[in-house]
Image: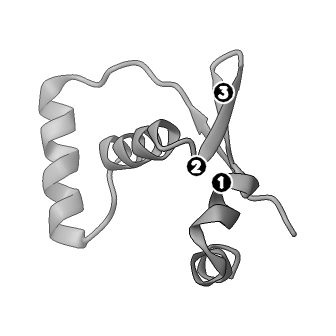
Amino acid sequence: MGSATLVRRRSTAAPIRQAAAMRRIASETGRVTKTQVSRHLRRLREAQLVHTHRRGSVVYYQLAAAAIERLGPDLLSVLYR
């Protein structure tokens, strides 16, 4: 079974105007914002479905295969497509 890893760099907080503009553009274009990704990753981490480790300012996210397998084969097949 393969391993999926997501890499995310920690960035400094953007000014409020810029963040609001990014949210507006994302809602108009249907794109996902960094804030949305961060929230989803936090939820996955809280549910212990991903493991994280940091190297400097880079955070590595990796699926917790054992936890995912407990959820069932149907979900697992969708995740590893």
Element class at badge 2: loop
Element class at badge 3: strand
Above or below for 5 versus 71: above
Relative placement, left or right, of 22 versus 81 is left
Residue kind at label 1, given as amino acid type: Ala
Image point 15% across, 68% down: which residue? 28
Between marks 3 and 2 in the image, the one whose residue lies nearer the viewer: 2
Image point 25% across, 71% down: which residue? 30
Percent across and percent down for residue 21 are 15, 45
Q: Which mark is residue 58?
A: 3
Percent across and percent down for residue 5 are 72, 51
Instruction: Please give the residue where the numbered disc 2 appears in the rendered image.
Output: 49
Q: Which mark is residue 67?
A: 1
The residues tagged by marks 1 and 2 sit, at their Cα atoms, a distance apart of 6 Å
Q: Are marks 3 and 2 in contact (CB under 8 Å)?
A: no
Q: Which mark is residue 21?
A: none
Residue kind at label 3, given as amino acid type: Val
Above or below for 68 versus 38: below
Q: Quadrant of residue 59?
A: top right
Q: Are marks 1 and 2 in contact (CB under 8 Å)?
A: yes
The residues tagged by marks 3 and 1 sit, at their Cα atoms, a distance apart of 24 Å
Residue kind at label 2, given as amino acid type: Leu
38 and 57: which is toward the camera: 38
Relative placement, left or right, of 65 versus 7 is right
